[in-house]
Image (cartoon, helix red, strand yellow):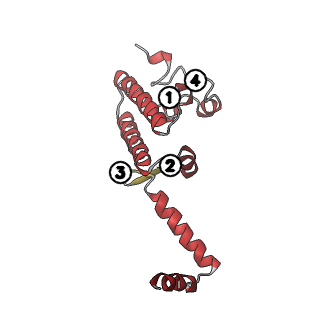
Amino acid sequence: MAVTKKIKNQTSFSMTEKEFGKVMDALYASHHKKYEVTYNDKFEMNLNPELIDKQGLTDKECKHIVKLHISRCKLFDKMKQENNVRVLRRYVKDLTQIEFDLQKAWKFKKDARFHSWWFLSPKCTCPKLDNWDSLGTGYHVISEECILHGKQHKK
Ligand SMILES: [Zn+2]
């Protein structure tokens, strides 16, 4: 009897379509908020919710990806402050490792052809659009003058 009464109460609860939409938006926002990457109190990026669903990632796995991005932000900060070429080139290697870790965390194959953070890193002067275009091809478009990737600065 108690169960019947409960269902009855629930069906008597009504909402307009607009109210329902608001509730759904709030639910969506609260669900995805934890997959926001913030670094030094600054919003950096959101993890793509469609991709999270597609890859079937758990809450724990998503939080791990957020952590990796925070590591990347920290590394970018260090790169901004560093001018020593040798140190910077070591950071480039650290970044490559983070990109591999990110691919693994996203359940993608570890594949350097799909790395994109290297040409988005501070002090990199390699052409961005050309590198977006050649993503996945195995070709990197390197600027000779780039302090991080160019030949000119190699010791
Ligand atoms: Zn570069």
The residue depicted at 46 percent of the width and 58 percent of the height is: 33
**How far across and how far down the image is residue 61, in percent?**
43, 45
- Name the front one of labels 1 and 3: 1
Residue nearer the viewer, 11 or 138 = 11
Compute the Cα span from label 4 to label 1: 17 Å
Q: Examine the rendering and report whether any part of residue 87 can be seen.
A: yes
Marks 2,3: beta carbons within 8 A: no
In the picture of the structure, the residue carrying the numbered disc 4 is: 140
Residue nearer the viewer, 152 or 47 = 47
Residue nearer the viewer, 110 or 47 = 110
Label at residue 47: 2
In the picture of the structure, the residue carrying the numbered disc 3 is: 40
Marks 1,2: beta carbons within 8 A: no
Q: Amino acid at mark 1?
A: Lys
Compute the Cα span from label 2 to label 3: 18 Å
In the picture of the structure, the residue carrying the numbered disc 1 is: 110
